[in-house]
Image (cartoon, grey):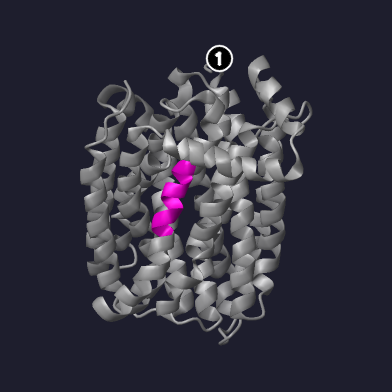
Amino acid sequence: MNISKPRLSFWQILNMNVGFLGIQYSFGLQQTAINPIFLFLDAKEEMLPLLNIAGPVTGLIVQPIIGAMSDKTWSNRWGRRKPYFLIGALLGSICLFMFPYSPYLWFAVGLLWILDVGNNMAMEPYRAFVGDKLPEKQLSLGYQMQSLFVGAGILLANGSIVLFQYLFGNDTVEQTGSIPQWLYYSFFIGAFLSLVTILWSVLKTPEIPPTEEEMNEINQIKRFSFIKRLKLPFVEIFEAVKTMPKFMWKIGGVYLFQWYALFIYWQFTTPLFMKTMGYNISEAGSQAAKMSLTYNTVTMLVALALVPLTLRFGGKKIYSLSLIGTALALFIIPYITDPYLVLLPMVLFGIGWAAMMGIPYTMVSKIVPQERRGVYMGILNMMIVIPMFIQTLTFGPIYKYLLNENAINAMLFAGAFFGIAAILAIRLKEKN
């Protein structure tokens, strides 16, 4: 059921999305710092995809379930979506504080699983939160504002890594089997931001109460037995998939190649610079952080600029062009050995990242029913984690046997997948 929603000011939309800053700071550390930590703790390069399986598995399980549960939740004090991203933020904050103290590889891997549960629990309801609050004409601004905070959060995470290595990295000697102390500080900042930014949005943004019809359904669910209430999210997910709009199936095809490629990029940037520039793990990890710093700066700068472009030319055209630009960036990076010149392709990557983190959510939010927005946003995020899950299971053998354990080949492989995603994106038919 669609209800009339008041138009919000720019600052109200900004306040409601501040919590995304902390969530994305945590994801920024996962993209750039976690794999170097695994390497510090003696992981082999071909193990990296499998060690990162926590992200796709927890996303596949947690996001649609939390989405379905939040659709059927209401608290007069806490609202509909906010209880979930508060609990997720608290869990993530604790894990980020503990991560640098990992004494051995499998302890760090276990923490990553718990951290991913917290991050997914916080992030999925946030996507639905924006759709709940904003009228259709402001959806593009709302989701591109989230894209801006994606850039800002990851920018801060990687900026802190570069800064602390510069300040303290030269004073420490790398030891096999241990994490350098300069890396601790970025995780401590993440533990603080994860909780504080979510609290900001929770306190600044009231949620829209359910309609009378929705409230009656919520009250009815409260009278169900424990077992029936436990089964309900799974029933909701199954029913939503059965009636899912055709557009979402098509965007799932785009996501299959897009997110498979992104996971390759995040996992193999550090090994790439160890090969192309002859760096050690710390130096290569720092260069990877600078790459992320650059593209997320671009994301911040262009995220809101994409709003009028998508309104004028259509979301799918801007989205497809951005994917082509990302593919070009990955084709170029392996052949640049200068640590400064290699940052230039990140301009294209940053534009692509801004589009990827905003435009698909805007398009989907316009076509799904309000009363099932949470579960459909969860399903959309399933379409992200399924390719990641496939990648973690398949790319290790591909890297070892087909790509000759060569990180350059891995990056070119990812570029080709972005090209396929761009072709599939131009075939999308969006709602006007």
> In the image, is 366 to the left or to the right of 24?
left
Which quadrant would residue 385 be assigned to in this image? bottom left
> Can residue 363 be seen in this snapshot?
yes
- State whether the magenta stretch is mostly helix, strand or loop: helix
Q: Whole-percent x and y of residue 396? A: 37, 74
- Quarter the C terminus occupies: top left
| Residue, disc 1 | 3
Of the residues shown, which amino acid type is indicated by label 1? Answer: Ile
Closer to us: 407 or 226? 226
Residue in view at x 61 percent, y 72 percent: 108
Q: Whole-percent x and y of residue 185? A: 65, 64
The region drawn magenta spans 379-388
Residue in view at x 34 percent, y 72 percent: 272
The relative height of residue 410 versus residue 427 in the rendered view (above or below) is below
Q: Whole-percent x and y of residue 123? A: 57, 44
Closer to us: 23 or 284? 23
